Image: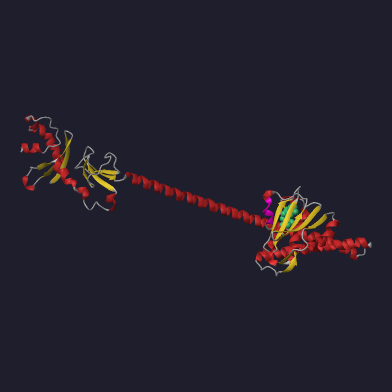
Amino acid sequence: MPQVQRQVIPQQSVTNDDARSRAPSNTLPAESDFRKLIGSATSGALARFLENKLRLMVWYRPPSAGPLVFGAQVSQKDLVRGLQTLPQSPDLASDGGTAYCLAILDDRGKPVALSRPGFSADWKHPLVATEIGESLPHWEAALYLVDPQQLSRSASTLRLTLGLIVVTLVAAILLGGWFMAADVRRQMRLAQQKTDFVSNVSHELKTPLTSIRMFADMLAEGRVTEPDRQANYLRIISAESARLTRLINNVLDFARMQRGAPARGRQACDLVDVVQEVVDTCRPHLETIAISLTLERDAAKLPLLGDRDALAQIVMNLLSNAEKYGGKEILVRVRQQDGHGYVDVMDRGPGIPAKKLETIFQPFTRLDESQASGVSGSGLGLTLARGMAHAHGGDVTYSARESGGSCFTLSIPLSEVQ
Ligand code: ADP
């Protein structure tokens, strides 16, 4: 009995083979420890380190054997051999089996079994590892990446993709915000322009109406008797009503253009003739306000197929602007070049600042200086002029005049006539 008891004390530190060390007095406390450990269980396994080596013992207490406990120490070699095939079990070889290697590491961190025979890695640094449990203390089941670079490559690809998604989202949010803000700004500017337009047009209607009424009243009441003054007043009335007509035409044509109404019918006409007629209409009025108007013609005739009224309105609008903003000298030049007819309307006014060049062709737009100077206008003249020119396949452009002033040029292709 005592001998049996002594043999099932693997955890006791046996320092020598002295018989005394196996004496019951030496083994008793260990025996009581062992009994404590196994409790009332009938079988089990116990692992202990002796001289830095793992000893695994299995034991069994048959119910009929009374206090006897039978035990056997498992040889480590056999244990390792038994474990060898375990990581290669088909249950563990899923599709990740090619990417990973499962290893069982002994208590010194050395592999004793591998799912990929011949695999080698830095055993100290597995991807994940877990202790196997009490029966094999300090032994680990560890997982290694077959190609560790692949994970860092996938991680950097993922990082890059996530980065790109985040950048794209942020850019989309910023861009969306910017578009919304720009749209709100545009709507506000448009609303402001429309308000300005209403007050500008009212002002433009009121000024000629006031003078028409004043001069008509004076003539009607017979307060002016000299024929010269009478003729002058009649000319003013005529010029002011022409101004009213032009303004109303501009507003109506702008509305037509906005509706996308088809262009008016075309007929054969002569650009030189059209310009001459407009100049003749405007000259008397301009002379009364001391503005000199000169007409230069490079060609006698510039025939084309177009809307005569629209062409006259373009030139009239340019001339009206030269009168309003362009000082005391206006030069109108009609010329032909490269199959196009050109009409330059030049003045000696302040000109247009470079950064405002395109805005003046937008509807309801007026330069601050023009507004401040008290000159009335609707902000539609140039928009219409350009729109009508485009309808003829031409354009209205601006260039600074040599030695100061503006030069607005109407260009119309002449080829359509032939
Ligand atoms: P408006 O009815 O105000 O004259 P336009 O569309 O004809 O409208 O012109 C737009 C703006 O362009 C004007 O308000 C003015 O500020 C500027 N402009 C037009 N023509 C001239 C010019 N010859 N010289 C200086 N500024 C001009």
* 128 left or right, relative to 192: left
Q: Quadrant of the C terminus?
A: bottom right
Which region of the structure is painted magenta?
356-361
Q: Is residue 323 visible?
A: no
Ligand 1: give its quadrant: bottom right
The x and y percentages for residue 271 are 75, 63
Depth order, front residue of 410/353:
410
Q: Residue furthest left?
A: 1
The x and y percentages for residue 273 are 78, 64
- Give the number of callouts: 0
Q: Residue at x 90, y 64 (%)?
A: 219
The x and y percentages for residue 85 are 19, 48
Q: Residue at x 64, y 55 (%)?
A: 188
Q: Quadrant of the N terminus?
A: top left
Q: Is residue 241 visible?
A: yes
Q: Is residue 357 magenta?
A: yes
